[in-house]
Image: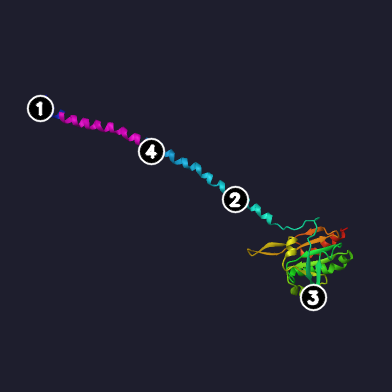
């Protein structure tokens, strides 16, 4: 072998070695991809806990069931009528003691000389002759003081007694002084309700949230059934 051939052989050897070296390093890239692939599933695990947040929201609804407890109280049919004594129109005084042994109607209305209350009172006045034949005494009750009550009675010629329950004691006993609402505000006021009391002093019929135009007819029918 000549000197030039030996030099060529030596120079070629390093080039061959250089070509083989990268082949050994190539496999190192594959494990890196596997590491990334294994880490990916870990991100999906927390997603399973999300539905648990929605469950507590439904538990708050039952709290609304407490509202019906505020419904009108007062004596029921068959119960003894609460006692009362009140000043009334025409300089009179009406009391349960003075009506002992007689049937009577105690009807509660919100305010004197207002449209609904006027319609109701005039309806009772028209039916008064028939109610009188049945031996029934009718008493209207409102939280007004006596002065506006007297004006109301005179204006519409209401001859039956209109009593003043200014301190709401009688209304409270009968469960007609209740919480009302208007335009988003709450306040205490009189519920339009009526109580028909028999000669035995017990409540024969109760009407809650009375419709003014129907009241007189309802009372007439119930009074006929009294013993």
What residue occupies the far top of the structure in this picture? 1
Q: Tag 3: Cα neighbours inside 10 Å, few (<14), some, or many (≥20)?
A: few
Q: Which residue is mark 4?
A: 36
Distance between mark 1 and mark 2 Cα atoms: 99 Å
Q: Quadrant of residue 25?
A: top left
Residue ranking furthest to the left: 3
Give the residue at x 57% y 49%.
Answer: 57
User: Please, which residue is most extreme toward the right here?
Assistant: 133
> Do residues under tags 2 and 4 come within 8 Å of each other at their CB atoms?
no
**Residue under the point 13% across and 29% down:** 7
> Dot 2, how many residues are within 10 Å of its Cα: few (below 14), some (14-19), or many (20+)?
few
Instruction: Name the residue tied to disc 3.
Output: 154
Q: Which numbered tag is attached to residue 206?
A: none
Question: Which labelled disc corresponds to residue 60?
Answer: 2
What is the secondary structure assignment of the residue under circle 4?
Answer: helix
Identify residue for label 1.
3
Figure quadrant of the C terminus: bottom right
Choose the circle earlier in sequence order: 4 or 3: 4
**Mark positioned earlier in the residue sequence (1 or 2):** 1
Circles 2 and 3: CB atoms closer than 8 Å:
no
Magenta segment, which residues? 10-33
Spatial CA distance of label 2 from label 3 is 54 Å
Marks 3,1: beta carbons within 8 A: no
Q: What is the crowding at mark 1: few (fewer than 14 residues within 10 Å), some, or many (at least 20)?
A: few
């Amino acid at each position: 072998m000549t000197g030039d051939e030996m030099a060529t052989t030596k120079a070629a050897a390093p080039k061959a070695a250089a070509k083989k070296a990268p082949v050994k390093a190539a496999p190192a890239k594959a494990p890196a991809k596997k590491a990334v692939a294994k880490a990916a599933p870990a991100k999906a695990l927390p997603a399973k806990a999300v539905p648990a947040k929605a469950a507590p929201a439904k538990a708050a609804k039952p709290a609304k069931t407490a509202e019906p407890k505020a419904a009108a109280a007062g004596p029921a049919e068959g119960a003894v009528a609460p006692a009362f004594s009140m000043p009334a129109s025409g300089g009179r005084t009406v009391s349960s003691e003075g009506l002992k042994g007689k049937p009577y109607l105690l009807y509660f209305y919100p305010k004197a000389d207002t449209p609904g209350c006027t319609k109701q009172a005039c309806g009772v006045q028209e039916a008064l002759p028939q109610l009188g034949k049945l031996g029934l005494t009718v008493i209207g009750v409102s939280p007004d003081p006596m002065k506006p009550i007297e004006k109301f009675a005179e204006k519409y010629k209401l001859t039956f007694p209109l009593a003043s329950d200014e301190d709401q004691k009688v209304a409270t006993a009968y469960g007609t002084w209740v919480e009302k609402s208007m335009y988003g505000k709450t306040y205490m006021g009189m519920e339009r309700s009526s109580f028909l009391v028999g000669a035995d002093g017990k409540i024969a019929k109760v009407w809650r949230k009375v419709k003014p135009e129907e009241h007189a007819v309802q009372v007439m029918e119930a009074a006929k059934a009294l013993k």
